Image (cartoon, rainbow, N blue to C red):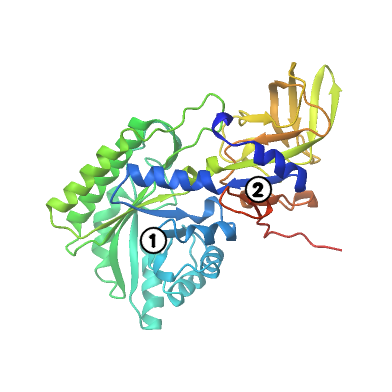
Amino acid sequence: MNFEGYPLEPVREAGKHFETPFYLYNLDILETNIETLRQATQGFKLRYAVKTNPNPMILNWMKNRVDSVDVSSSGEIILARKQGWQGCDIEFTGPAKTAKDLQLALREQIHSIVIEDLSEAELLNDIARQQGVTARILIRIAPALAEENFGVRLAGRPTQFGVDEDKLPQTLSALQQLTHLHLAGFHIYSGSQCLNDESLANHFANMWAIFQQAMQLWSQPIEELVFGAGMGIPYHDSDNSLKLTHLPAIAQQIREDIASRNLSIECFIEVGRFLIGTAGLFVTRVVRVKESKNTLIAICDGGMNHNLGACGHLGGISHRHYSMINLTGSDKSVEKYRIVGPLCTAIDTLAHRIEMPKISTGDLLAIGCAGSYGPTASPLFFISHALPTEILYTQKEQTNDGFIQADWLTLPQL
């Protein structure tokens, strides 16, 4: 991540007023990211993946800025509903939906339940029959071929996510017997963390090709298609940022294909990380610096328990440190450091051999691309250290210097 595009002065100011460690989410950057994606995919609707950052204040803020949300648990259904999202604007995904989950989804009149397997469809059909309703569903398709240049690939291998592409004909045939289900469309999410613009466009083209084949297998009109974005963000100094240069053309081609066939289909892009990831920073304070066996070690009050991904434990094969900057240090002489968190485990390491301007006790270190998969994707309660503060910032907020405290997670108190 290049910190030059991120306004750091408000982050330094937050360090004077809020306890560390903290997450700061810049709503102005988030809004810009939303608008950038809308411009690149005109005619598509945006569906925010709640799992990426379920902070209630962010969910509330999103209501007037994206078209719907994707949830992956009963807990996320409740979170979204409590923040004013209507059931008609919620999609429910996830491979382990229980009868209790499906009952809740029907009670809350969730817009679409994404089916990952025929047995799940059969269970939902039974529950819908018992409740005297028809459940609106999408079928998630697991593509047969994996995409190139994706950091995480879900396609082309055994997966708990979706119906294998080659099993789609028999699955759709069996669905015709489930009279309390209404198949409204199809869903694909086959990879994530793509940083190559050409590969991203090919990904959308491939999804569209699979969707067309699926529609030919189903005799009834299709109302909705969900394109899993898979858009990545530059966690590391050497990473490129997506420019979305190729995406507008393929988005236009898809729209034109739909219009030429007189189809009435809503197209959604399911996205989370690309929107909010670069809007967030994780800030931790250096408690002390020690030397051990010719290695300088900066020990911080925030670490793996607050930001699992930054320690390389959230899908990374090998640990490459995330982009990091010293917000407050004044000595520009460069040293090599190991940067660690507060836990009693050696795997609580934010960086192994990072070169940075001199780090001193009390300095604030900021880690970039921290807006997604942060607190709720981390072992917050391990060793019961203080939870990270969460802060929203916008220049449009006229009070409190633009800061809005957004804490919602708690530890037991004396």
- Relative to residue 319, is residue 396 depicted above or below? below
Near-viewer residue (65 or 306): 65
- The residue where tag 1 is placed is 114
Q: Position of residue 7 (x, y in %)?
A: 59, 37
Q: Secondary structure at mark 1?
A: strand
Q: Residues within 10 Å of mark 1 (few under 14, many from 20)?
A: many
Q: Position of residue 265 (x, y in %)?
A: 24, 58
Picture quarter with the N terminus? top right
Q: Position of residue 44 (x, y in %)?
A: 31, 51
**Which residue is most to the front?**
398
Residue 12, by quadrant, is top right
- Relative to residue 238, is residue 210 depicted above or below? below
Residue at image position (43%, 32%) is: 195
- Inspect this view and state whether residue 304 appears: no
Q: Secondary structure at mark 2?
A: loop
In the drawing, what numbered circle is on residue 378? 2
Residue at image position (59%, 53%) is: 397
> Is residue 19 rendered to the left or right of residue 104?
right
- What residue type is disc 1 on? Val
Which label lies toward us, 2 or 1? 2
> Is residue 116 rendered to the left or right of residue 8?
left
In the drawing, what numbered circle is on residue 184? none
Whether pointer 2 and pointer 1 mark residues with C-beta atoms closer than 8 Å, the reply is no
